[in-house]
């Protein structure tokens, strides 16, 4: 309920959305949550909430292993749905939910809230549209924290494989999404991963992955007579991403995008950032032409959040409200095709490092 708590609190900054009801596995739990966050109605079953005509969209923030079950229930009831990341614990479950949502013409998305932060929106515009750092060469993204600061080992869901615990499902979606953002949402042609599993619980504690993105064209700038801005042999669209994530120690948590003309850094905390910087290169190695810093302060409120920068959930919620009002069934910032791409990458990583599915013995 911690992420759900933060999401609801952030709605105070969204004039076009409000929490009208909540549900839990018991009416007592639901009522406690409702009382804390001033939600008008509390239900002891999900079916009761889904029968409520005042509910336009359901935010699902329960434990990972129930994503498909609850997502399916919402969609079958004709409700739009926002499923927290990971969208599903298995690629086939993600594919099922996306197909179901599209067949029923309902809005559906994965809660990749990072994509909606103004710093990330600006980074995308500067890199992908304005090409301010030239052609993207590589992306480096990390998200490591010491889970034992707040989670009891081995009891916490974080360390429980049967409910979808482990680093790959809990934190890997962020660096994966950072990589795909700057390679235009395409699937990598190759993914190689290594990591460590906990012998007691079976969850992965940390991992590193390298993604290789294939060229989208066969003429390098250096060989293109019409190219006046670039003179490198890098083929269009090609590049690599280096990702690191885990539950054991705290890293810088930044995303660095390296281009032929400079680099962009999404500052820490990279999954919910308020700052980014750009360093443009001059002619010659090690020479800087310009440095720029962008600052995007969060909305101000009285706090009460469990996690850093959670007021930023408002950006995601506002975007969802705009899409539903406009009749859109997906958000442009993180399409369902990109969700499927992410799910496929995560599944490859899990298999390579030896993690069993949550529903395997």
Image (spheres, grey):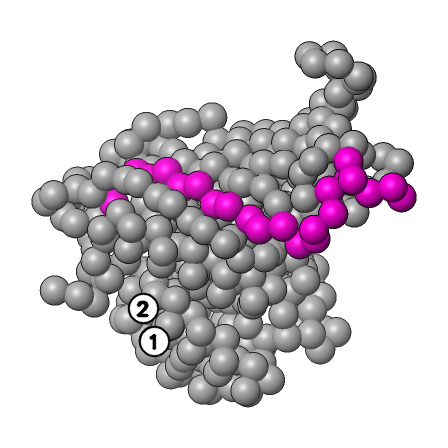
Q: From the viewer's perspective, is 115 left or right of 93?
A: right
Residue 354 x, y percent position in the rendering = 22, 51
Q: Residue at x 48, y 31 (%)?
A: 253
Residue 50 x, y percent position in the rendering = 45, 82
Tag 1's secondary structure? helix
- Front-most of 344 and 27? 344
Q: Residue at x 43, y 61 (%)?
A: 343
Query: What is the C-alpha distance between the residues marked 1 and 2?
Result: 5 Å
Query: Which corner quadrant of the image does residue 171 belong to?
Result: top left
Residue 84 x, y percent position in the rendering = 45, 60
Circle 1 is placed at which residue position? Answer: 69
Residue 275 appearing in the image:
no
Q: Residue at x 75, y 28 (%)?
A: 261
Q: Residue at x 17, y 66 (%)?
A: 360
Q: From the viewer's perspective, is 47 left or right of 351?
A: right
Q: Badge 1, how many Cα within 10 Å: few under 14, some, many 20+?
A: few
- In the image, residue 309 above or below residue 37: above
Q: In which quadrant of the rendered image does the N terminus lie? A: bottom left
- Front-most of 36 and 296? 296
Residue 349 x, y percent position in the rendering = 35, 51
Q: In which quadrant of the rendered image does the C terminus lie? A: bottom left
Residue 333: which disc? none
For the magenta stretch, what is the residue range? 204-226
220 drawn magenta: yes
Q: Are marks 1 and 2 in contact (CB under 8 Å)?
A: yes
Circle 2 is placed at which residue position? Answer: 66
């Amino acid at each position: 309920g911690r992420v759900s708590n933060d999401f609801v609190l952030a709605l105070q900054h969204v004039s076009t959305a409000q929490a009208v009801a909540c549900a839990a596995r018991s009416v007592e739990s639901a009522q406690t949550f409702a009382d804390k966050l001033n939600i008008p109605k509390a239900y002891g079953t999900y079916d009761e909430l889904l029968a409520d005509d005042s509910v336009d969209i359901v935010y699902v923030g329960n434990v990972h292993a129930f994503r498909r079950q609850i997502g399916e229930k919402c969609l079958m009831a004709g409700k739009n749905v926002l499923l927290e990341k990971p969208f599903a614990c298995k690629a086939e479950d993600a594919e099922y939910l996306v197909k179901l949502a599209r067949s029923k013409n309902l809005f559906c998305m994965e809660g990749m809230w990072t994509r909606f932060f103004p710093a990330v929106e600006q980074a995308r515009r500067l890199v992908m549209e304005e090409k301010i750092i030239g052609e993207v060469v590589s992306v480096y993204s990390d998200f490591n924290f010491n889970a034992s600061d707040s989670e009891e080992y081995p009891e916490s869901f974080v360390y429980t494989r049967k409910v979808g615990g482990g680093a790959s499902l809990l934190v890997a979606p962020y660096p994966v999404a950072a990589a795909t953002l700057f390679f235009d949402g395409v699937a990598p042609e190759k993914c190689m991963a290594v990591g460590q599993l906990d012998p007691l619980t079976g969850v992965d504690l940390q991992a590193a992955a390298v993604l290789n993105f294939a060229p989208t064209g066969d003429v390098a700038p250096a060989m293109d007579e019409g190219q006046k801005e670039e003179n490198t042999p890098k083929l269009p669209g090609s590049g690599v991403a280096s990702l690191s994530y885990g539950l054991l120690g705290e890293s810088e948590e930044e995303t660095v995008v390296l281009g032929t003309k400079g680099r962009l850094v999404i500052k820490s905390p990279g999954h919910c950032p308020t700052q980014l910087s750009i360093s443009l290169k001059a002619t010659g190695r090690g020479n800087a032409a310009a440095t720029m810093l962008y600052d995007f302060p969060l909305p101000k409120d009285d706090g009460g959040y469990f996690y850093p920068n959670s007021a930023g959930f408002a950006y995601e919620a506002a975007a969802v409200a705009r899409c539903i009002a406009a009749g859109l069934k997906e958000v442009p910032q993180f399409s369902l095709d990109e969700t499927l791409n992410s799910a496929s990458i995560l599944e490859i990583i899990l298999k390579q490092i030896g993690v069993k599915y949550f529903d395997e013995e």
